[in-house]
Image: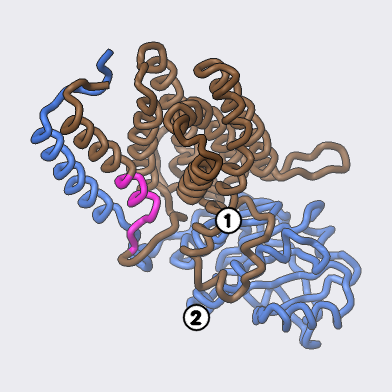
Chain colours: A brown, B blue
Amino acid sequence: MYPIIELGPLNLGSGALLLVIAVFVGHTRFERVARLRGGESLEYRASRCAPFALVGAAIGARLWYGLFNWDMYSQSPGLFLALRLGDLAWPGALIGGALTGYAYLRLRRMDDAAASLADAAALALPLAQAIASLGLLLSGDVLGAPTDLPWALPLFGVLRHPVALYYLLATLATWGALAWVARFASQPGTLAILYLALQGSALLVLEALRVDSLVTAGGVRVAQVVGLTMILMVLWWKRTHTAHAPQSL
Amino acid sequence: MGFFMTFSQKIWDLLFIATFLIGSAFIWMTRTTPGAASPTIAPAPAATQPAPLVGHPAPEFTLTAADGSQVALNDLRGRVVLINLWATWCPPCRAEMPAIQQAYERFRDQGFIVLAINQQEDVASVVTYMNDQRLTFPALLDSDARVAAAYQARVLPSSFFVDRRGIIRAVYRGPMSRGMIEGTIEQLIVETP
């Protein structure tokens, strides 16, 4: 665990540093993939929509965390604006970013490109997530359940599931699968749907190995509910499209 | 070109229902159960020499609290102690205080205490801050940075989790999340010395 990277007189939080790099890489790749897949027109739309989606993701991540830590956040509302990496939640970022990005496209009457931009985001997000997961691995911000498996990593004096590493591998696998499918999937939205299914599965399975999950009534982990919802959304979407169009993607 | 499998609508309905049921059952089976941890035996210390390192006895200190009382770490043997070195001018220190307070309220009846060791600020500033933020754990005054030196605190905040035997079990330099704080305390609080 290396929560602090010392660069001369500077002490930088490893998690925060890699999160900044992840955002930069994700943003750059989003625009590049948009250009490769849809030319300058799609790149222009991506570049216009990205800043709003990023702000929406940041707000969503903090609101989500605050909502599920309401006992603490209601006592100290200033925490909503605090620069704390540990107080961000990925499901909130995904929902906030997607909703804000789509709202911007609707407002600017560019929503005809929403599916293509969602595909570009699906190809850009996994690498950014992998970098952010590496940051969480270094900072120790994801506390796994104790285990004696050979690949367990020590954190706070206990051998634990390296859940941040699992997430890193899951996002790399997602990235590989999407890059492969992208070679022959022509229907806009296919990659985004596949991304939702794979990331939903990762959330559903891997979150079970954490001991610091955000929980709701009955001790149910919120991220698992989000993961299952993502998978069900994909199945419902597929069912609906099967009903209306006999051609598959 | 087809990528997803071409099932009939009925098959997709069945898949949807099966995924919902199996997924929900998995979520329920893997839900968190607070307080379910069974007592464990604390591992043997790695060393006998006091040092600000995991496995070593925590370096002893006695400091004056903001309320004027004297607090000695040795007197807290038998309790799980979070030693948190902080300052009011340090934004990450301020941002993690609510999470520490929540942990203190949740675990103090089980033998958990926080020693918030302020770095070289005047008592009035510390008392004002603690009252404004409604922080109820003891704030100690490290006026000459003696404890910061003993704990090699080059970064603020720096946190040390000390078990019931006085052994440092976790060290964290930098801000901690709520999950990290409470997860570590949950682990230590159930241990028998």
Q: Which quadrant of the structure image shows residue A170?
A: top left
Q: Is residue A14 left or right of residue A151?
A: right
**Which percent across, then down, holds residue B116?**
72, 71
What's the chain of the residue with tag 1?
Answer: A
Q: Which residue is mark 1?
A: A87
Q: Residues within 10 Å of mark 2 (few under 14, many from 20)?
A: few
Q: Which residue is mark 2?
A: B109
**Which percent across, then down, holds residue A245?**
20, 27
Q: Is residue A67 left or right of residue A31?
A: left
> In the rendered image, is residue A166 in sight?
yes
- The mark total stands at 2
Q: Which quadrant of the structure image shows residue A205?
A: top left
Establish whether labels 1 and 2 are both on one chain.
Answer: no
**Residue depicted at 63% across the width and 58% down the height:** B168
Magenta-drawn stretch contains B8: no
**Which of labels 1 and 2 is toward the front?**
1
**From what the image shows, is residue A106 above or below residue B173?**
above
What's the chain of the residue with tag 2?
Answer: B
**Which percent across, then down, holds residue B42?**
48, 59
**From what the image shows, is residue B170 above or below residue A47?**
below
Q: SS of the residue at dot 1?
A: helix
Q: SS of the residue at dot 2?
A: helix
